[in-house]
Amino acid sequence: MGERTVVADVADELARRVAFGQYAPGELMPSVRQVADEFKMNRATAQLILGRLESYGFVDAHRGKGFTIRDVRTEGGVEVYRRLFRLSMPMPEVALEMFGSIVDEERAIVLDTLLDYTEGERRLDPAVLKADIDELESIARSKDPDPRRMLTIELALLRRLQTALGHTMQRAVLNSIGDMVLEVPEAVQAYFAASPDLHVLVWRALVAVWDSDGGPSEAQLALFEDLFGMYHQKVVAKFVELVGVDTAAATGGPVRHAATA
């Protein structure tokens, strides 16, 4: 095992302890010497690890004092949340809480993007969108569809729409959400709770509407929103199945979002 892997693994372990309460906010982090002793490494490597935790946003450095624990639950930004989600996978209930928040935010942004583009001026060359969808279909119809590659293409399609709409902040948030999901294989698989072909069909239907002179009716838009909501419910249900959350506990009440717990 190389030093780089050791640094990453130990930094993740310490970050996990911060994130899930083993080290309380405001307390001092174990010292360089303590980290070196516990993980049987030299002090230079231990110092590097604590520096990495600072760059992650999990601790603050104080000259002559050491590193103090940050309250990452209440003070952490998007990058902290991203790391928390990946680190939460050994704790299925926590992972589900966080995934529920991710799905809620993603659904709102994607729905707004698709509806705004459908109802507004179409500024993109349809050929560009169709080329991406053709690639999506090629993967979906392959012997072993790659969900990660398909999700990456769909995110790229959404970025094109958001750029055309001028939704720069939404694009930035969606990019961060995409990074969170793509880092966790179970999350990627959950987004394909339905057949990969269905993803292609939805994009084909949207392009057909965008190519037409008239837009969809209010009834069609309402149906689309309902179907979109049902799809995301299936995504969360698939995640429950993949991470092994106790079904009774998971469905006993609303999902509580870990970011604000």
Image (cartoon, rainbow, N blue to C red):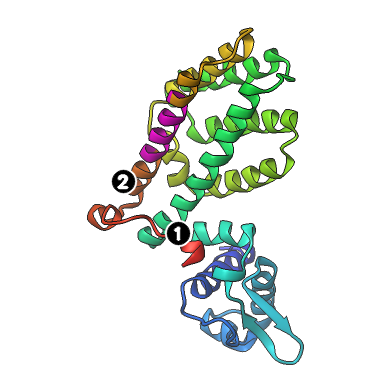
Q: Which residue is mark 1?
A: 257
Left or right, 259 with reference to 95? right
Image coordinates for residue 227, horizontal then vertical, percent: 41, 28
Amino acid type assigned to the residue bearing label 2 in the image: Glu
- Tell me the CA gap for discs 1 and 2: 19 Å
Left or right, 99 with reference to 123? left
Q: Which residue is mark 2?
A: 241
Q: Secondary structure at mark 2?
A: helix
- Disc number lying in front (1 or 2): 1
Specify the farthest residue to the bottom.
64
Circle 1 residues within 10 Å: few <14, some 14–19, many ≥20: some
Measuring 50% from the left and 65% from the top, which residue is drawn there? Answer: 260
Left or right, 216 with reference to 239? right
Image coordinates for residue 236, horizontal then vertical, percent: 38, 44
Amino acid type assigned to the residue bearing label 1 in the image: His
The residue segment tinted magenta is 223-234
Q: Secondary structure at mark 1?
A: loop
Residue 153: quadrant of the picture:
top right
